[in-house]
Image: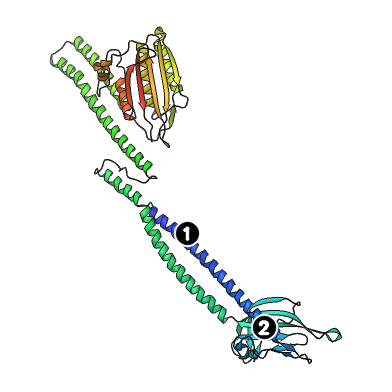
Amino acid sequence: MSVRAPSLEARQLLAASLGLVAFLGLTGFALDRAFTETATSSLRERLKSYASAYYAGSEISRKLEFQPPYVPPDPRFSQPGSGLYAAATGPKIDWSSASTLGRDLPLQRTMPAGQMRMDGPLELVDRAGGPSEQVYRFAYSVIWEDGSGKNKREIPFVFNVFENTVDLDQQISVFRWALWRYLGAAAVLLLAVQIIAVRWSLQPLRRVQRELQRVQRGMAEGLSGSHPRELAPLAESINAFIVSERENLDRYRNTLSDLAHSLKTPLAVLRTSLDNDTQVDALREDVRIQVQRMNEIVSYQLSRGASSGHQLFAAPLEIEARAEGIVTSLEKVYVGKRVLCEFDLDGKARFHGDQGDLMELLGNLLENAFKWARSRVLLSVRSEPGPANRRPGLLLTVEDDGPGIPPEQVERLLQRGVRGDERVQGHGIGLSIVQNIVRAYHGELIVDASRELEGARFTVRIPPGL
């Protein structure tokens, strides 16, 4: 059981959604990290300012007692359990703010002088058995200098400032909630825009699909010409393929019709001979002649039906080697005439089609030229450049120095459906096959006089293809 492949729209929406989720997720993560680092940095600067304010407004008595400023930098330092704590600790200093009452602080006791450090979250224990707090700690190591000369004192201590994580966590939580809410709303909006954009961008493909369905149902002859630039080559190729298939079908039908029509006369002759009680020897001769004629008719019509016609995606065929092979065979057939065949070939010229068609074109035109030439035949091949991104066309000319074709007979010679017994005297071999092949490639066959050799000139022009 085959699994149905997802549609182009589903593929694009899935890819766009994955890309959108990845982009918004990375954006949200980056913004979250940036806000967290900014909020933490702001907390560090705030705690540093508290430590600096305490240091600037404090004194140390002669008894080495730490005397903080009368008014603390923040009123919460005076409120027990406020979440904002300060302490000074050193070999000779041990002080803590009123807010630390009943709490064991995770103090930083020793640090190199002048160093500052931010740590956290750390656990602050309530001695009364209450819930512990998570705090951030800012430690600032200083050396207090007092007096001068011999009375100069240097008192090292570390000033610690603590703040619980509630405010910072709340800020981050509020920011994250707003961030992901807005990013989620943006994701929904962008997804809706993507759905509209994908459906709009795939609308030309849906139109091609609908037109193909109309062609399949026989409601249209082909695709319309109004398509975006990217789909125009596809529409042109499909239309050319449809035309090619219809032409092939018409050609096969015409071949069968011509074959049936051509066999009527030999069959009628045989029926007449049987009805007239013709003698055995005469009847045998009539049967032989008519059977030979029917064999020739069948071979001719099959050769017409065998020409495969215009192929859209055929590989380019090199012409020179195939022409040389045909000329070599013809030189053996017409060895008594000593005909010289000259080539004037463009090395870049290529035939884009079926190899059998190329051999039929070259074989019939060259054989016709060899048969009626006096001594010279000229084969010229040129490449015809086409528009950009299209394969080049082909200009193939066969000339001879024979008697030529009267201009008044040219139009009759190239009429559709002309058979062997209706062709111009001396220039009828295989021209109907050549005409059918050229028509199948949307080309033209021109018959006129050769200026260089003064005989007949057959020019096949195949236009640039897709």
Circle 2: element type: helix
Residue farthest toward the top in the current orientation of the protein: 336
Give the alpha-carbon distance from disc 1 to disc 2, as whole Å: 51 Å
Q: Could you say which is closer to the camera, residue 430 or residue 38?
A: 38
Circle 1: residue type? Gly
Q: Is residue 18 above or below residue 180?
A: above
Residue 161: x, y in percent?
66, 83
Q: Residue at x 36, y 28 (%)?
A: 462
Q: Is residue 422 left or right of residue 12?
A: left
Circle 1: element type: helix
Q: Could you say which is closer to the camera, residue 168 or residue 25?
A: 168
Q: Which residue is under mark 2?
A: 53
Q: Is residue 147 above or below residue 277?
A: below
Residue 436: x, y in percent?
30, 26
Q: Which residue is under mark 1?
A: 19
Quadrant where the C terminus lies?
Answer: top left
